[in-house]
Amino acid sequence: MAERMRVVYPSLSWICARPHRLIAFGFGSGLLRPMSGTWGTLLAWLMWIAVENWLPSDLYVGLFLALAFAYGCWACLKVCRELDTPDHLGMVWDEMIAMWLVLWLTPSDWISQIAAFVLFRVFDILKPQPIKYCDAHVKGGLGVMVDDILAACYALLVIAAAVRLGVLG
């Protein structure tokens, strides 16, 4: 018999009651429907635009992303347990971290950033291998987070090729 996933739609007040929930649900952006992952990615992009001119050295940005990834693994695992689901659709911290990673390593002009947004979403939605495999087999908070990092890597490969060919940046 197939395992049934319990469908739960948490409220904004439930999310705001604990910091790990607020982070996992992308400051509430994961509650937006349809396409909660796209809304979370859009919020990440808007937040990046707001701070990109004041970002510290690349070392600090990389350290922040690593710590935010690790915290996301823990927060998403905790929320998964609270909601009794392996990966709630509203958890978008994984999209946010992955989008920040892509933006950090992408030229900062608008065309490159739009390409980064679109490419990341396409790879996150289509889930080519090994993303699909990881999404199906890697469980817990790491499982929630890692497939989006892989989608970010695919987007970054395409962006790097476009930069090298003179299409972007």
Image (spheres, grey):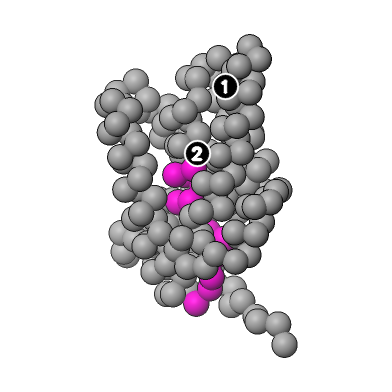
Residue 161 among magenta residues: no
The answer to whether one can see residue 63 in this image is yes
Disc 1 is placed on an element classified as: helix
Q: Is residue 138 above or below residue 52?
A: below
- From the viewer's perspective, tell me whether residue 82 is left or right of residue 6: left
SS state under label 2? helix
Which badge, 2 or 1, is on the more N-terminal residue? 2
Residues rendered magenta in the picture: 84-99
In the foreground, 75 or 59: 59
**Picture coordinates of residue 112 (x, y %)?**
57, 21
- The numbered disc on residue 28 is none
Residue 98 lies within the magenta run: yes
Q: Judge whether 6 appears above or below 88 on screen.
A: below
Circle 1: residue type: Ser
**How many residues crowd mark 2 within 10 Å: few (<14), some (14–19), many (20+)?**
many
Q: Residue drawn at (45%, 51%), measured in percent from left and top?
A: 93
Out of 100 and 153, give the one closest to the viewer: 153
Amino acid at pointer 2:
Met
Residue assigned mark 2: 99
Toward the viewer: 48 or 138?
138
Q: Position of residue 162 (x, y in %)?
A: 64, 20
Q: Which residue is mark 1?
A: 112
Q: Quadrant of the N terminus?
A: bottom right
